[in-house]
Amino acid sequence: MSQRAYNQLWADAQLELSRLLTEELPAEPPRPEKDRVVFFQRLAMLYVRYIQVFRQLEKVYDQVVHPQKRRVIRAILDGVMGRVLELKNEMVEKEFSEYHYMDDVLHDLKLKPADLEIPIPHYFVSDRSKELQERKTMLTDILKMVVVTERPEPLMAKDMSQEEAIKIIQVAERARQGRLRAKLNEESRNMNRMYRTKDPGSASNELAAVCIQKVWRGYIQRKRAKIARDEEMIFLGMAMNPKYQVPCPAEITAQASEACTRIKQEEHDRDYLMSLEAVTNQLRDVEGHDMSKTMKDQIRQWFIECRDATGSFPDYPDEDDGGSALIFAEKDPKQLMEEIAAKEEDESNNKPKGKEEKKEKGKRDKGKDAEEEEEAGLKMLPSAFLSDLELGNKTFVDFWQTRSESRNFNQRHEVELIKEEKRKVIEAEIRVQVDEQMRQELAEWKLAVDKDKGGKTKGNPKKKKGSKSGKKKKKEKDLTSDRTLGSLCQELVEQGLLKQANNVRLQDYLGDYSYLGTTLRQNDIEPMPSLSDVRQVLSLYAVLPLGSQVVHEKAPLIKAILMAGPAGVGKYPGKSGLAMMLHMVFKVARLLQPSVIWIEDAEKMFYKKVPKEEKELDPKRLKKDLPKSLKLIKGEDRVLIVGTTKDPLSADIKSLCKMYSKIILIPRPDYGSRYILWKQLIKKQGGKVTRALDLSSLAKISDGYTPGHMVRVIQSVVTKRRILQQANRPLTAAEFVAPLAKIDPVFQEEEEALKSWYARTPLGKKRIKAATGKEEEAPTKGKDAKKKGKK
């Protein structure tokens, strides 16, 4: 696609965004919605539409090369990402579930399930590629150093009796003789075959020719039938044309073009930053003196006008009020003086508040609460991103939408735009200097006038800012203030707390869309989420907030996630050692943010009863200290704790839910997900999926098996030797059945136990309460119904 096409795509995305903003920010606030289903439908519609805008803007930002446009698009993209997270959070609170099924919304908007996929912006990695490479290099060097310094364990000689030694020697010798005998037998058989002569028999040449023709014609006919059958399946749309299964030349060219575009982006951005610095220095040198002189003349003129209007020189506005910027407002001197005086009176009046005022305020608040109770219902929560989106949309409409770029074919930065932007910055810098000089000059003018009058000079003491009441927040004590990041990382590596993460993409987490979710919920059956739903939730809760600082600071804060589903660290002794370990882990996580702290077997620190074999390890040591460390993570810290558990039933559910604000239930793969997993995993291992491989039957018989089980089976079947044999002997489903049967599946009882456990979590309890409340609400009317709706 050309740059013109991406500009048009940006315009289309902005048009849809302006429609969404019009709906979300109406002239009059909408009345509360009493029907929960109708309200959720509205939320779901907004959510899906924002995702479509998000997908478009991400594509545009990834490929547009104009540096100034990219900065505007980036701000809008972050705003849209944040709004998607806000709507997701609101949907969870209103439907009391982490997973939502919106088949009707997709049908109304004529979209496919794939359109609900959350895209991961490329700039999450590309903008930090150098930093990530440096971090990877540092960790690799530390790992190498630790491996080198580790001493190998001394080999211990095992005591052995003479009888045992003789027995081992005999076994080895008999095995050697057996191998040698087998080799000699094989050679003799080969020699016999070589010198064996066959009796030509009485078969004639004609009979031999007929036999050959028969075999050949059968082979040719079978080949023609296979070609005809494949063509028919392709024509009916039941199979894909092989020419589309490999990248076509157009796709390869497009991918190369995208790579070139990203290189061009870096070049244009580098030129823009250099131009930014050059233009700023140029403006400061050329126009700075004139700006300063003009400001001083205007301020002096204001002094004189105030003196003529009021009979005395005015007080200079404080720096907190804007300094001389307040003077240049379109107001006459009298209005300006009155405004300053009124502001001072308001400040003095607002400070003391008596008990009577508080009582009156309390009465007013009670009256408001009564009015709110009358209009009970569901309302949209306030948003931290709508104002940013409105500003970004206004910037696009006022400036970029109607701007002609016929002369800027290469889409490089525009110097005039930089000048307009930097003039304001330089003007603000110069105003601070001018204000200092003019305050001094005003004081000298007042002194000279007072001396002429023979009066006493009045000082203009600066207002003392009142000390802020309230307790001072305790700062976290840095237990390792004298240590470098490298030394901390090295110690964590040595103790087994910091490990090299595998390079796994979210796209590798395969799974199909849950097509029956809506139908099951309509019949009051809570469906198990599909792997596609889990992937989407992880994208929203973990990847997007960690990838963008702006989104993380303003979006609903999620500090810890627990992933529960069917199915080593170094030890610091004592309480002080435990505090040191947690401090080091969280300090390194903050220094290397965005970062994820992974806790395997998260249920162990919240055991109801510690098993005998684990009592020595004391797994409950972290139960009190870890939640305390979690509280120290603030909105600006892009640190996420991810816990994984395969036995959540053994933990105290109250403590576990207090630690992890989001609990994601990972299910067994459903039929659609299993079909995709078998197909993609076999291909990834090097196998060929042909018509001989019945994936449908394989997906049916593997019900209850996890993706890990499938990977193990595929690795045992699709070996290097088997890959070489595929041309003559294609893979079949029967080959995977035997190794699959040796593995115990996840039984239905285990899944039901997980579902019943999840029903006892805070969100699960709310959902059950809402479901039972619906049945009770049907006969109720009037005030009782309103009270229940408010709950």
Image (cartoon, helix red, strand yellow):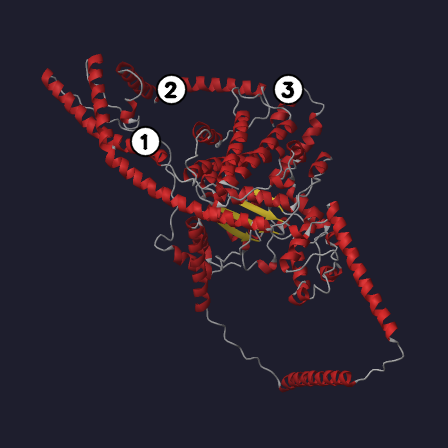
- Residue 783 badge: 3
Do labels 3 and 2 touch, CB within 8 Å?
Answer: no
Q: Residues within 10 Å of mark 3 (few under 14, many from 20)?
A: few
Q: Which residue is mark 2?
A: 354
Regarding residue 606, the answer to whether it shows in the image is no
Circle 1: element type: helix
Mark closest to the chain's N terminus, 3 or 2: 2
Q: Which residue is mark 1?
A: 424
Tally of marks: 3
- Residue 368 badge: none
Relative to 133, residue 431 above or below: above
Residue 778 x %, y %? 71, 25
Q: Residues within 10 Å of mark 2 (few under 14, many from 20)?
A: few
Q: Which amino acid type is marked by label 1?
A: Lys
Give residue 265's quadrant in the image: top left
Residue 614 x %, y %? 58, 58
Q: Which amino acid type is marked by label 3?
A: Lys
426 sits left or right of 791 in the view: left
Is 48 or 780 nearer to us in this picture? 48
Q: CA distance from mark 3 to mark 1?
A: 57 Å
